[in-house]
């Protein structure tokens, strides 16, 4: 094995056997990447759907109580534009703290439930 030095690190050239092993590993990973990305996308979409449900309920409650965005702004400290984006942006990704502030402004409590998958 030939050694070459670059900076402070020493790099060793892999043997032909090692190079072949690493090539096979890279190929296996490349084959798995689309499946991994699809799984991650499905998980993200599921989470987004649950967040969307919570925001939809909060917005409906706000409207039912006749509260404006300005009313919620005053009670939460969140800007009207942030609240509007939260309510109308399907890709909104609020923090738990933001949802708790919004719920609290409506006299509600945000609950989190943990259940087994499946």
Image (cartoon, rainbow, N blue to C red):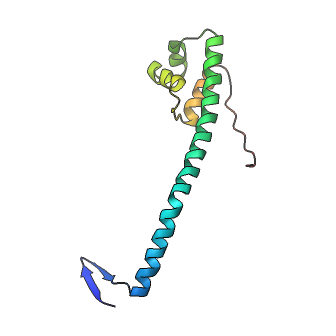
- For the point 34% across and 84% down, which residue is it? 12
Q: Please state which of residues 98 and 91 is positioned toward the viewer in this rendering.
A: 91
Q: Is residue 3 left or right of residue 43?
A: left
On screen, 31 above or below 4? above
Q: Is residue 7 left or right of residue 113?
A: left
Task: Determine which quarter of the picture holds residue 16.
Answer: bottom left
- For the point 51% across and 16% down, which residue is it? 74
Any part of residue 79 in sight: yes
Total number of numbered labels? 0
Q: Residue 68: percent from the left, percent from the top?
A: 54, 11
Any part of residue 77 in sight: no
Task: Determine which quarter of the picture holds residue 20.
Answer: bottom left
- For the point 59% across and 45% down, which residue is it? 42
Q: Pick out the residue farthest to the top.
A: 66
On screen, 27 above or below 33? below
On screen, 109 above or below 71? below
Q: Residue 112: percent from the left, percent from the top?
A: 69, 38
Q: Residue 106: percent from the left, percent from the top?
A: 64, 19
Q: Residue 1: percent from the left, percent from the top?
A: 34, 91
- For the point 61% across and 15% down, which residue is it? 62
């Amino acid at each position: 094995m030939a050694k070459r030095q670059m900076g402070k690190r020493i790099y060793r050239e892999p043997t032909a056997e090692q190079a072949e092993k690493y090539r096979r590993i890279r190929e296996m990973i490349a084959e798995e990447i689309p499946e991994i990305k699809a799984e991650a996308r499905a998980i993200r979409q599921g989470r987004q759907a649950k967040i969307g449900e919570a925001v939809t309920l909060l917005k409906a409650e706000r409207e039912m109580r006749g509260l404006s965005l300005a009313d919620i702004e005053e009670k939460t400290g969140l800007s009207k534009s942030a609240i509007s984006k939260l309510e109308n942006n399907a890709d909104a990704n609020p923090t738990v703290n933001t949802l708790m502030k919004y719920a609290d402004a409506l006299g509600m409590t945000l609950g989190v439930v943990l259940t087994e998958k499946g």
